[in-house]
Structures are given as structure tokens and as C-alpha cells.
Image (cartoon, rainbow, N blue to C red):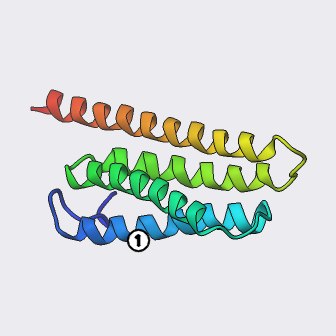
Amino acid sequence: MLGFLPQKRDFRWLYWGIAYLIVVWGCLVLNRYIVLGSSLEIVMMLRLMLLAGIIAGIVNLAGYLGARWIWLGSTLGIACGLMLMMINASNNTGWEDLVSFLSFLMLSACGIGAGIIVECLVALVKLTRR
């Protein structure tokens, strides 16, 4: 099912990580400056890039080490979190910017947790088949 992903300890995970960083950073910048309508600040853009780099690094490190189900779960959680963040931020009446970011973090954490659970279940099934 996860045949489109590189194998464990493959150099191509670096390219996946860079693409992941660009996509997550782009979504965060889009939310901040287009959806929320904030003024353009280079320092904030660099902070968002740092956040996207940390997220991309953790998720793709899991994939590089062979935990591809964790990668898939966290990617789905992050994607859903980014979508919910943009939906929540669109009503900008005061608290929506904070609530939208917290919803992004919550769904990202749920995706990582779901990926860990699935990875453990897959490992348990492989272990019992031996």
C-alpha cells in the first residue's frame, strides 16, 4: 500500500522532506497572510519556515527510519489540521487565529498518535505470523 514511498534509509527521503517543508510552509504562510490578512513580516515568515522544518524533519525522519505508517498517519493529520486551521481562521473575529492554530496542532498530534498505533499493530501482526 505504501509503495510510492522510498524504502527505509533511502536518500530520496531528503527530497521528500524538502518538498514536505515547502508545502507545509506554503500552507502556513497562505493562512497567515491571505486568510488572516496580516501584514507581511520577514521574521514571521522565517519562524513559520522553522516550524515547517521541524514538522517536516520529524515526520520524514520517521519515514527514513522505516516507520512508514507513522509517516502516513502524521501526514494525514497535518493535512487535516492545515485544512481545519484555514477553515477556522476565515471567520476572524478575534480568537479564531489562536483556535485555528491549536486545532492544527491537535489534529497533527492525533495523526502522529494514529500512525504510531497502526505501526505497532502492523509490527504485532508481523510478529505473530512468524
Q: Can you tell which quarter of the image residue 115 is in?
A: top left
Q: Residues within 10 Å of mark 1 (few under 14, many from 20)?
A: few
Tell me which residue sits at (65%, 39%) in the image: 102
**Farthest left residue in view:** 130
Which residue is nearer to you in this view: 46 or 4?
46
User: Which residue type does callout 1 highlight?
Assistant: Ala
Tell me which residue sits at (15%, 30%) in the image: 127
Which residue corresponds to mark 1?
19
Tell me if 59 is positioned left or right of 84 in this view. Answer: left
What quarter of the picture does the N terminus occupy?
Answer: bottom left
Tell me if 100 is positioned left or right of 110 in this view. Answer: right
Percent across and percent down for residue 100 are 71, 45
Which residue is nearer to you in this view: 74 or 51?
51
Percent across and percent down for residue 96 are 80, 44
Tell me which residue sits at (80%, 65%) in the image: 37
Vertical position of residue 67 compared to residue 32: above or below: above
Tell me if 105 is positioned left or right of 33 in this view. Answer: left
What quarter of the picture does the C terminus occupy?
Answer: top left
Percent across and percent down for residue 28 are 60, 61
Report the number of numbered marks. Answer: 1
Q: Can you tell which quarter of the image residue 21 is in?
A: bottom left
Vertical position of residue 17 compared to residue 99: above or below: below
Tell me if 22 is positioned left or right of 103 in this view. Answer: left
Tell me which residue sits at (69%, 61%) in the image: 32
Percent across and percent down for residue 85 are 69, 50
Which residue is nearer to you in this view: 121 or 12?
12
* SS label for mark 1: helix
